[in-house]
Image (tube, rainbow, N blue to C red):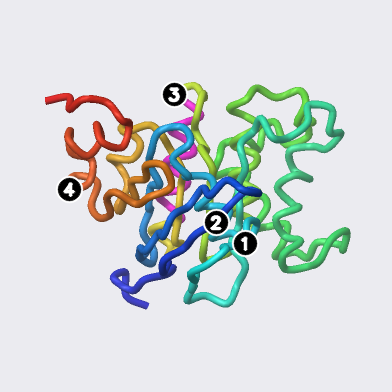
Amino acid sequence: MSHDTAAITLSAVRASYGPQEVLRGITAAVPHARITAIVGANGAGKSSLLNVIAGVLPATSGSVTTTGPERPAYVTQHSDVPDALPITVRATVAMGRWAHRGPWRRLTTKDRAVVEDCLARLAITSIATRTLGTLSGGQRQRALVAQGLAQQSGLLLLDEPTAGLDPHARTLIDEALTAARDEGVTILRVTHDLAVADQADHCLLLRDGHLVGEGLPSAVLTPDRVAEAWGVPSLR
């Protein structure tokens, strides 16, 4: 499949939480085997758009079309996982194989190899026997990203995967995502960090549920467009 092929096509997508409309007619194309950053200020609709693509939040109108048959792998923020959850890092990553094996079934030799590879990619093999509640935020987020990669889906969705993390954790996650992209995975990552978005291959810029820019980050994240998206005077 060509990198120029759209992995996801959004057509006039609207979505709401109760009476509050959070997406207002989003039309966009997400390229295959590229990293697409969904960018905007708080409340712009970034996570809502990711939830619609994941199938967590139903669109009230419009359509979302994906080219792959498999379900997307969805990585939440580390703060969404309870501290008291008594599960090890290795077991957390192994849960990513449930998409192929079903829950609680014995892992195959291939499954175990995938899990160990994903642990190594995020440099968490040495803490594989520790429970999530004993980890730092960066370590926990790396475990969740490894779990997402272990699903071996062609579509990986991440909600602020490096927000609030130390530089070491951010670098490891960014490198793992780049490697996955190079292996043909389509990646969408929500961020409000313009430096992160600038390193992506493609960018969707949102403001108040509207798409106000789409394309290469260098073309989308101009001072005027960024100022518009954040609702502030132009920085120039």
Between circles 2 and 3, the one closer to the viewer is 2
In percent of width and height, residue 163 lies at 50, 29
Task: Name the residue tied to disc 2.
Answer: 15
* Mark 4 or 2, nearer chain start: 2
Under tag 4, what secondary structure?
Answer: helix
From the viewer's side, name the closer residue of 26 and 124.
26
Quadrant that contains the C terminus: top left
* Mark 2 or 1, nearer chain start: 2
Residue under the point 56% across and 40% down: 122
* Mark 3 or 1, nearer chain start: 1
* Mark 2 or 3, nearer chain start: 2
Distance (Cα) linking label 3 and label 4: 27 Å
Q: Amino acid at mark 2?
A: Ala
Task: Name the residue tied to disc 4.
Answer: 219
Magenta segment range?
Answer: 167-180
Q: Amino acid at mark 4?
A: Ala
Q: How many marks?
A: 4
In percent of width and height, residue 199 lies at 30, 42
Between circles 1 and 4, the one closer to the viewer is 1
In percent of width and height, residue 123 lies at 57, 36
Between circles 3 and 1, the one closer to the viewer is 1
Task: Name the residue tied to disc 3.
Answer: 167
Q: Amino acid at mark 1?
A: Pro
Distance (Cα) linking label 2 and label 1: 7 Å
Under tag 1, what secondary structure?
Answer: loop
